[in-house]
Amino acid sequence: MLRASIVILMAVLSILPVCATDGGKQRFIEVNGVSQVELVPDRIHYIVQLREYYAEEFDGAKPEEFKSCVSMDQIDKEFRNHLYELGIKDDAVRLQEVGDYGWRREGEPFYVSKRYDITLDDFVMIDKINTRIDRKAVEYMRVGDLECDSIDHYRRQCRVDALKSALTKAEYMAQALGAQVGEVLQIEEPAGAGLVEGVSSVATSNIAVDAAAGYDNFRTITLRATVRVRFSLKQ
């Protein structure tokens, strides 16, 4: 009974008087409408950063015992060969950055690293890359930007659905008070809560990730629209 009273009180507080142009007063109801849609991306950018390493790093040897450095040229060649074997074309692989990231040992050159941006059209391919890649050379792997060709259409549709949601909410709230919804008086997208875009997923991979993580932690593009609509009320 207490819960029902709270709901009714909230509805009553939403119906406020506002001065009309004829000097009288007009009752209205103001509600928020929300809509959310998840899109499967057309293109997935998979970011892989590789680094040089000593083979002895993974054999329990001490740094002063490191001898066999696996060069970036060798790592790069093997990595691109694996991608080619998976059917990933060269124009889908973009080298984002090449740099030094730390001393090998005092008096020796820096380690070299490379970061790649691989454009894919299927999350399953991430699993295949992860199973082929030289894991010793991986500094990190993560899913980057997701792209959808029809996203503009869904942005518009998300807003439309939010407006419909607001109308439905206003109608049943007004009906509970013995009133009817009239014309639309005002529509606005609240600051910071209008149309929000994001990615729904579990945190992305690193060097210790399971091979199938990129596929199992499926990602989608999420659009969420919120609108505030004011309707006049009729008896």
Image (cartoon, rainbow, N blue to C red):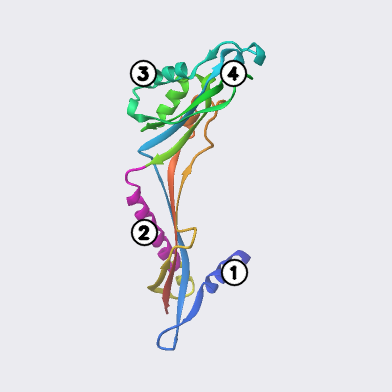
Residue kind at label 1, given as amino acid type: Ser
Gap in angstroms between the C-alphas marked 4 and 1: 76 Å
Labels 2 & 4 near each other (Cβ < 8 A): no
- Judged from the image, the secondary structure of the residue bearing numbered disc 2 is helix
Comparing marks 2 and 4, which lies closer to the viewer?
4
Q: Quadrant of the N terminus?
A: bottom right
Q: Which residue is mark 3?
A: 85
What is the three-letter code of the residue carrying label 3? Glu
Q: Secondary structure at mark 4?
A: loop
State yes or no: residue 78 in magenta: no
* CB under 8 Å between discs 1 and 2: no
Q: Earlier in the sequence, mark 3 or mark 2?
A: 3
Label 1 – label 2 distance at C-alpha: 32 Å
Q: Nearer the viewer, residue 183 or 11?
A: 183
In the rendered image, which residue does mark 1 sit on?
5
**Element at label 1:** helix
Extent of the magenta region: 148-171
Using the image, tell me which numbered label, if any, was put on residue 108: 4
Give the CA separation, mark 2 to mark 4.
62 Å
Answer with mark 3 or mark 1, whichever residue precedes in sequence. Answer: 1
The residue at the point 45 percent across, 18 percent down is 73
Name the mark on residue 145.
none
Of pointers 4 and 3, the one earlier in the residue sequence: 3
Q: Quadrant of the C terminus?
A: bottom left
Q: Are marks 4 and 1 in contact (CB under 8 Å)?
A: no
Which label sits in the foreground, 4 or 1? 4
| Element under disc 3 | helix
| Label 4 vs 1, first from the N-terminus | 1
Q: Image quadrant of residue 26? A: bottom left
Task: Indicate whether 94 appears above or below 161.
Answer: above
Crowding at label 4, few (<14), some or many (≥20) Cα neighbours within 10 Å? few
